[in-house]
Amino acid sequence: MAQRLQDTDAFILMQFSTAVAHLKGKPPTPLMQAEVAILGTPFLKQLLNNGHTRNEAASLLRSAFMENILLAKRSLKQLTEA
């Protein structure tokens, strides 16, 4: 059961990353943060339904978003070094 929840969490976070991918590399303006919050709401609810606390779910989403940004920066760095 625990593995199934971890797989479900990973899928939710992957879907969230896809939903916010167009925001990669944009400066963190209040408008962009509001868009992330709106796009993240369904994923937050799914994580809550999986048994996470609100703080845990928000932390997971924040980490997924930040990982998305870090991957974009690495890709850009690789392109500029080539």
Image: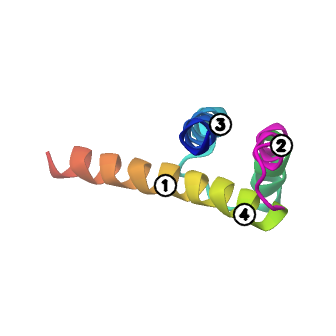
- Residue 56 numbered tag: 4
**Mark 3 → mark 2, Cα distance in angstroms:** 11 Å
Residue under numbered circle 3: 12
Please tell me which of labels 4 and 3 falls first in the chain: 3
Q: Secondary structure at mark 4?
A: helix
The nearer-to-camera label among 1 and 2 is 2
The image quarter containing residue 42 is top right
State the image coordinates of residue 28 (x, y, percent, origin top left).
Answer: 68, 62
Number of callouts in the render?
Answer: 4
Pointer 3 with pointer 2, Cβ within 8 A = no
> Separation of disc 4 and disc 3 at Cα?
14 Å
Q: CA distance from mark 1 to mark 4?
A: 16 Å
Tag 1 near tag 4, CB within 8 Å:
no
* Residue type at the position of mark 1: Glu
Q: Nearer the viewer, residue 72 or 9?
A: 9
Residue indicated by mark 2 = 49
10 vs 78, left or right, is right
Looking at the picture, which amino acid does disc 3 mark? Ile
27 within the magenta span? no
Residue 51 lies within the magenta run:
yes
Write down the region rendered in magenta.
40-53
Q: What distance separates the C-alpha of mark 2 from that of mark 4? A: 12 Å
